[in-house]
Amino acid sequence: VEQPAWWTRAVVYQVYPRSFMDSDGDGIGDLGGLLLRLDHLADLGVDVVWLSPVYPSPQADNGYDISDYQDIDPLFGSLAQLDELVEALHARGMKLLMDLVVNHTSDAHPWFVESRSSTDDPKRDWYWWRPPRGGMAPGDPGAEPTNWQSFFSGPVWELDQASGEYYLHLFDRRQPDLNWENPQVRQAVYEMMRWWLDRGVDGFRMDVINMISKDLRGRDGAEDGHLHDGPPLPGSALGDGSASYLCGPRIHEFLQEMHREVFAGRDGALLTVGEMPGVTVEQARLFTDPARGEVDMVFQFEHVGLDQGTSKWDLHPLRLRDLKASFNRWQAGLADVGWNSLYWDNHDQPRAVSRFGDDSPEFRRDSATCLATLLHLHRGTPYVYQGEEIGMANFPFEALEQFRDVESLNHHVQAVSAGADGASVLAGLRAMSRDNARTPVQWDDSPHAGFTTGTPWIAVNPDHAEWNVAAQRDDETSVLAHHRRLIALRHTDDVVALGDFTMLLPDHDEVYAFTRSLAGETLLVVCNVGRTTYRLAELLPEAPAAELVLGNLPDDDPAELRPWEARVLRLP
Ligand code: ISL
């Protein structure tokens, strides 16, 4: 019998370096700061650190716009410090995942600079260049080759005046998309990846990796024919091109080639996770089937889309039964083949306790620990985003000047110029802006929360006086201590790591319950995702008498399930 992979019992912690810890007083977090705080990660007990990009970059998208894949931006430190980080993590039994951003580069990357330099440059074809739409002049309104809208507002095409051609950028115009159809591009990426693995890193989190295969052929199949416009997007003059670039025709071929060229022969100790907006369960089974040699797991987006209408700025209340149905489908779909990743939070999402929990003073601690229990007890590899382990909440944004993120700022410009009312645009940003996740980690109650001695690049949340690492470290009832226990439980309990998942009470509006079973042993997990008190026996008759393995509230009345209470019980 084959041993389950090491990452089935691992927990990953994401560091967004700009906001983690600043060691040199410039107000921006750095590798030196991360090195100072490794004890926090060791104390939490995580197995892997995923480090968001630290490569040289103009920082148009906080490092997701890379201008050199094989160095460290001086803003964050040096290659020597990266080596030191690998060594220090390994010495503590932890691994390092690098962020791999190869759907696009920065427009300052030498590859793009060369590509843009002339239509017959050898690197012209490394990016997606196209002439204006048939018969139109460059720059004419609507002359973009397709009507597709970019993720960060506006068209995906940017005109290069010098050549009169447009280049494709699914994200910001300073993030041109690489042309993976060109084998030289693929080989250059694989070579870079091998260089990092040889340096000792333990794997990659692959940014929007399901977008690298694109179908830009025209309807008649000719490259220079009329490209595919997408269906109109609600509230926008532009269209949705995702059918042409999400999980495109060669995506599996490219990932299998990458696996052969980069990971073959050394994959046992590594970890690969592909970030895949829009991926379905059926596709995820293919991506994560070990026999196919693609990636170990994917980040899917279904559960973080359930509180949204036509766009992420258009908010809807989340219905718990929808969340349950979604998780249940993913748990079932990847039960016999493949593997799930589990997350509430990352640097692109608002804070979980504010979004899925209840960040009012009365329930903030209880809802943060409840959500953590719910997530960590599913089958899959949990990802903890910096600050989540202490219950960090959304920032009380009041004015546009407080935002930094390119997505938020572009959206504001676009929405207001399209006639939206400023106050409602701001309300959308306040709830959903990625900046909610990007305020500095709250280490202590000092003026800048112990993050920097300088002026932080984005404001520290004023709640840091109460919510910080120092205040929670020695408090066994804290959100931090609860995370420590959940992580330890996955390490020691095979049922948590590997047990089969069965959803209970699928239609209940407030209680989320399920079992995990392995080799005759069963854990019952019951979480009250709301403010009502329930009689436990009426919901789950076997629960009140079961042995408590881990709970988030004082262990006094087994018959009642209190607001935001979570219990992990062992059934006899
Ligand atoms: O944040 C999002 C929703 O508004 C997503 O669309 C996000 O842009 C998408 O998940 C891709 O994210 C990744 O690639 C982006 C980068 O800005 C994100 O930070 C990164 O996680 C482009 O590299």
Image (cartoon, rainbow, N blue to C red):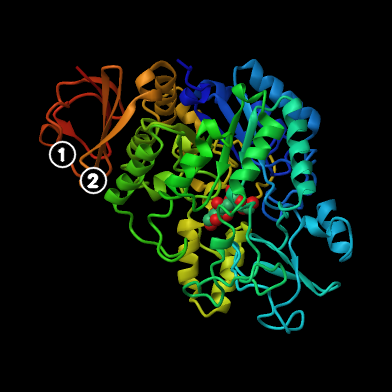
At label 2, which amino acid type do we have?
Glu
- Binning the other alpha carbons within 10 Å of mark 1 as few (below 14), some (14 to 19) or many (20 upward) gives some
Q: Where is residue 224 shown, x and y percent of the image?
A: 72, 71
Q: Which mark is residue 510?
A: 2
Q: Quadrant of residue 570?
A: top left
The answer to whether one can see residue 408 in this image is yes
- Residue 254 percent coordinates (x, y): 65, 44
Residues at circles 2 and 1 in contact by the CB criterion of under 8 Å: yes
| Residue 408 in picture, x, y percent from top left | 57, 61
For residue 561, what is the image quadrant? Answer: top left
Residue 33 visible in the current orientation = no
Upstream in sequence: badge 2 or badge 1: 2
Q: Nearer the viewer, residue 149 or 44?
A: 149
Q: Is residue 547 left or right of residue 33?
A: left
Q: Which residue is mark 1?
A: 534
**Which residue is nearer to you in this view: 49 or 230?**
230
Vertical arrangement, residue 417 with respect to residue 510, above or below: below
- Badge 2 crowding class, 10 Å Cα cut-off, few under 14, some 14 to 19, many 20 or more, is some
Quarter holding the C terminus? top left
Q: Is mark 2 within 8 Å of ligand 1?
A: no
Residue 195 position, x and y percent, is 78, 32
Label drawn at residue 31:
none
- C-alpha distance separating marks 2 and 1: 10 Å
In the rendered image, the vertical position of residue 224 relative to residue 563, given as above or below: below
SS at circle 1: strand
Secondary structure under tag 2 reads: loop
Q: Tell me: 533 left or right of 265.
A: left
